[in-house]
Image (cartoon, rainbow, N blue to C red):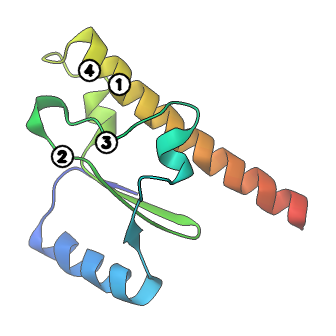
Amino acid sequence: MEAARQSPELTNSLEFLKRDLNLRPVTADHLLRRRPFFFNAWPQPLGRSLELWWDDGLLVLIGSLTDLWSHPQLTRIEIRDVHEWGINLLHFVWQRQHFRRLLQ
């Protein structure tokens, strides 16, 4: 789930999800920060912060990652960082789905 900006409705929904689904921020030792590319902190191109919350089976991204993949004001290095971050997300989702299928 991706949300381009945080509106009051989204803030209320996110608080509900955090409470009822145990959504929590991604910690520094989480696989999303380490594989396949290492990130100490999430990229923040154009001063926009990207927040990622997770629980089993659900990732909530606050910020528009897909818009940043081809933003004309970003440098090549910034675009590559955002691409690598997106690859980490896709890799993590694929890996969890693959392991779940193996366990069934």
Q: Circle 3 sits on which residue?
A: 41
Dot 3 alpha-carbon crowd within 10 angstroms: few under 14, some 14 to 19, many 20 or more:
few
**Amino acid on which disc 1 is placed:** Asp
Q: Circle 2 sits on which residue?
A: 49
Residue in the image at 51% along x and 33% along y: 87
Can you tell which mark lies on residue 7? none
Q: Nearest the camera: 33 or 99? A: 33
Q: Circle 1 sits on which residue?
A: 81
The tag earlier along the polypeptide, 2 or 3, is 3
Tell me whether circle 4 and circle 1 mark residues in contact (CB < 8 Å).
Answer: yes
For mark 2, give the secondary structure: loop
Residue in the image at 31% along x and 85% along y: 16
Residue 74: quarter of image: top left
Q: Nearest the camera: 39 or 68? A: 39
Placement of 13 over or under 61, stated as above or below? below
Name the quadrant of the C terminus. Answer: bottom right
Residue in the image at 84% along x and 59% along y: 101
Measured in 3D between alpha carbons, the distance from the residue under mark 1 to the one under mark 3, in whole angstroms, is 11 Å
**Amino acid on which disc 3 is placed:** Ala
Mark 2 or 3: in front is 3
Residue 48 position, x and y percent, is: 14, 41
Name of the residue lying farthest toward the top:
76
Name the quadrant of the N terminus. Answer: bottom left
Residue 69 position, x and y percent, is: 32, 26
Residue 82 position, x and y percent, is: 34, 29
The tag earlier along the polypeptide, 1 or 2, is 2
Mark 1 or 3: in front is 3
